[in-house]
Amino acid sequence: MLAYKTYLEKLTGCFTGKAVGGTLGMPLEGHIGTTDVTYYNPVPTEMIANDDLDLQVVWLETIREKGLPVTRRDLADGWLAHTRVLCDEYGACMRNMRNGLYPPLSGAYDNLCTAGMGSVIRTEIWAALAPGDPDLAVQLALEDACVDHARDGVDATAFMAALESLAYTESDISMLIDSAMSYLPEQSRVRRMLTDALAWWEETKDARAVREKILGTYPWINWTDVAINASYIILGLLDGEQESDPMKKISRGICTAVGLGHDADCTGATLGSIFGILYPDSFDERWTKPLGDALVLSYTIVGMHEVKTIPELCMQIADVCCEVQKFYHSVVTFADAEEPKNALRIRAVSSDAHRLRRGKAVSDYNEREALISVTPFTINMIYPESVAHKPGETLTYTAEIFHPKGHSLTGCLSLHPSDGWTVTPEKFPLSGEKMTITFSVTAPVDKIRRTCKNSLTFSFVTAEDITIDIPCGLMTTIPAVHVEAAWDGETCPPDSLFEGGELQQWTEWSHPVGTCGGHLYAFEMRTPYLSFPAVFSIQAPGKFRLWRNGELLKTYDGPDYNPTFHRAQSAVKLPIANDWDRYVVYVEREEQADVSPENCEPFFRARYDGRLLFGLAEWKTLSWLDEAEFRIPQLGTK
């Protein structure tokens, strides 16, 4: 049992700390070195807008609109409706969802940013909706994390959600960390790094010394890596706890975490939240007074009902929390809470109706699942391993279908794919409370261009002769011609060099290069609408040159491997038009580094594994061009 007044104090402290830590760390976001941090620099006049808090406000809006249970499919809808945050894992998942690929597939497929900080920084709302109930907090956080993350990113989210949830009812730091660690799989890279960091801390009691050991043991390229930054959060927590006075704990801890660098706004904001839950009345006024209590959201959050202040936001969260506790039968309830002012809609018989299948180790779920619908019928589809079809290829899908209220299924289901695609069988009678169907889908064989927008529609005709259509997406491969060859100079290789080359079909925007040495790739792409400036990002496991229609666009021979559009040193700005362009890439793959791949974060591992990645985005918004079309290179014509 938790006193409602205590909960409100801790909840307000949580989001006050979020604003304080995020504002402190924002000027140092992406700084790789260490910094001696003692106070805001520059001193703000209000909180700095940050996606750390933005998306949690979106989730609250979505829950209040959609009702319970909290599902990854509803969060996907909220994301598409209210956010224009398009970089890194956010951009990858939005591209997938625009193509009809829903969570958790949207977070795992064609996404090299699965281990970013994007979902760890959103855990406060799930802990706040399940205070003192870490099992429930992790369940809710998993529905969120799988939208745009997988593996390390999901693991770390479970850890942080559990720790924050427990902090509402427990104050022993060792117990909080140990209990939260139990939600990490034994083989998890996040667990290994945190275990090592805790051991090194016990040896040194020096956060910067532990930082150096972490960076020397776990190879990394991406400064948003979740395992490294989660370690910095815990180091800041432990360092702060060396002070006896709670006010000094907070100041020392958040300055330590931010001073360790990397994703400093995220580490500062998350640690500020934890301290705010533990010590809600202990923030020095020098941290809170410059910010005030106004809630400031980024310009990338759109179509939202306005929440003016942090206390107002907290009251809305508390209102929803009371409903969540009842619906999910939480082990912690409030004895003295007021009745919720706005009752939420209930759309399922059971809180388990839409859960990902998993054990306590959160990564146990199938990353090829996609919850494509919640109501009026719940459909969870399992995609094939490759997800994308080669031309003419037949792949097998499985779908689970049930009524969210537990009613019997009646009527008929028919499957309707896009033109040129075929499905076998096409029709299924509906019966029972839950049914599983298996069917084969065959991609067109006679199209030379790859169109991203392919759909499969589940068309239900009920016993009352009502038709309900629920679409999802189908993917096809990207064709490219590859030859192993060395190429000197800046002139574009002639078409004749590609004669007899291997026609490859890439299932994602990245593809293994193969053996060390020289490799040439040719592919053709267009965007079927008006011209505009774009940014082309290309990453390679070695130095490379890029040509378009014979013109050299980029030469790069640096160490950077960063599959983003706004941070990659190898990115190039260029105008594009709605005509077919020939792109040729020459890559000299380097020898593999002498490292343990299981210790590497995904960006490093992608380079280590020799993956070539390319992507095209709008210049201003950095939105992945999911409408880009590809065709088999017409060699000899350009």
Image (cartoon, rainbow, N blue to C red):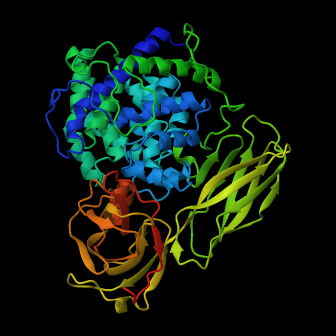
Vertical placement of residue 92 versus 37, above or below: below
Q: Is residue 171 visible?
A: no
Residue in the image at 26% along x and 64% along y: 572
- Location of residue 464 (image quadrant): top right
Picture quarter with the C terminus: bottom left
- Location of residue 26 (image quadrant): top left
* 131 relative to 565 in the view: left or right: right
Image coordinates of residue 605 in percent, x first then y, are 36, 60
Vertical placement of residue 182 versus 17, above or below: below
Residue in the image at 22% along x and 63% along y: 559
Picture quarter with the N terminus: top right
Image coordinates of residue 441 in percent, x first then y, are 67, 67
Q: Is residue 473 visible?
A: yes
* 543 relative to 614 in the view: left or right: left
Q: How many labels were placed on the picture?
A: 0
Residue toward you, 490 or 511: 490
Image coordinates of residue 417 in percent, x first then y, are 67, 63
